[in-house]
Amino acid sequence: MNLSRSFILITAMAAILMLPSLGDAQPLSARLQDVLLQGIEACFAGDYDTAWSRFEQIETLDAAHPAREFYLATVLFWRNNVDHNNPRYDEQIRELLRQCLGKSQAMLEKDPDNIEALHYAGLAYTYLGRMDAHRGDFYEGGVKGETGRQYLEKALAQCEQRKTTSDQEACDLCEEIYFPLGAYTYFSGRLPRFLRLFDFLWFIPKGSTDEGLEMLSRAQAKACLHQLGAQSLLTSIYATFERDRIEQARLLSSDMIRRFPDNPYLDLQHARILLDHGQIRAARQHADGILKKVSAGKRNYDDVVELGARLIMVEAELNQEDIGTAANRLAQIQNNPAYQNNTLTGRIFLLEGQIADLQGRREAAQLAYRKVVEAEAHRVDRTTQKKAELYLESPFNGPQA
């Protein structure tokens, strides 16, 4: 064998050795999709550590892609879901979303009509707007939200122009857009009426609850990456805002719990939906199951989750008009310092007021309701606060009143 033939053979062998294995031979987009789906499944399963490590892998697939930063931010949102007013991850989430936005804009500088880049830019802006509004900065929230909406609507316009359809076994990016756009449209439609009167101002979010629900339902049916997110959000919307659809909330939640039995947020949400649906015994049983997971040391089933389950037990007892048992259980909660400084703390005061009202102690009840209304932001959610404001004016007469 002469030198020339030897060189060719060695070069060919080296090239073969450098080829990716069959397991790695997928196109980049398909490999990225697989990693994203694995991470999303881990989030919904309540395994946030695995989700984080999966999303970190995107750095080795495509360091310039914005998906890594966006989905790492979603892991932190999940970690905070039960204690959602706690600002512990705020700065980290904001920084990740800003990085996501930066990478999206770099892609758009090369191609202003890049649907994927428009999608992630819209996601980043709407999530940043959501955070601003949730923390009380409604102007900045409106500005960022409207900017995000414009990116998402441009992405959909590009889809219409191209009549884009993806391989049936791949995620259709155009269907993914309906999730963030639907969420933004729905919650914009729920703005107070006096704000909607000023919708000629560009920074006032514009939307319709009916259109938003239609988009979210489409995402649940047709999206790939955002299918679970759409189902979860629809569950929350039906349970919290569209109370005539509580049965739909129960069905969606039952399906989520069947698929993901050990996610603390989904677990607590399901117990509360059962309670609101009038299935008191089932709600108590489910809350008791959550407490057993806490005792067993199940991952992410912490003191806040335990508090949530115990509060559901108190509410169930009130529904059964067992005021004495409810009052005793609430006293045990009040005496535990581990339960006194999180988003659910306001519910302790609310229940204190409700029990006092049922016992005919109106002054004590009003004092408890004022604790809710005047509580620091991280210790009360808005729904609890609105109930307290209502009962300050008119006494609580029981769940069936």
Image: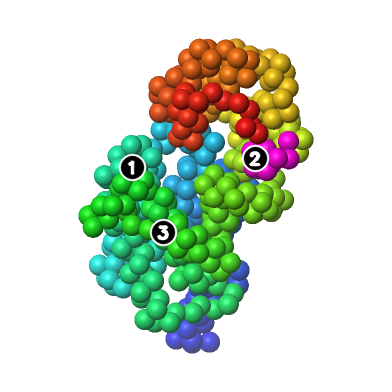
194 relative to 11, above or below: above
Q: What amino acid does circle 1 point to?
A: Asp
Question: Looking at the picture, how far across and down is residue 110, in whole percent?
Answer: 27, 70
- Mark 3 or 1, nearer chain start: 1
As helix, strand or loop, the secondary structure at mark 1 comes to helix
As helix, strand or loop, the secondary structure at mark 2 comes to helix
Q: How many marks?
A: 3
- Mark 2 or 3, nearer chain start: 3
Q: What whole-number distance in Å separates the C-alpha atoms at marks 3 and 1?
A: 21 Å
Q: What amino acid does circle 3 point to?
A: Ser
What residue is pinned by disc 3? 208
Q: Are marks 3 and 1 in contact (CB under 8 Å)?
A: no
Q: Are marks 2 and 1 in contact (CB under 8 Å)?
A: no
- Of 83 and 310, the residue lying toward us: 310
Q: Are marks 2 and 3 in contact (CB under 8 Å)?
A: no
292 relative to 113, above or below: above
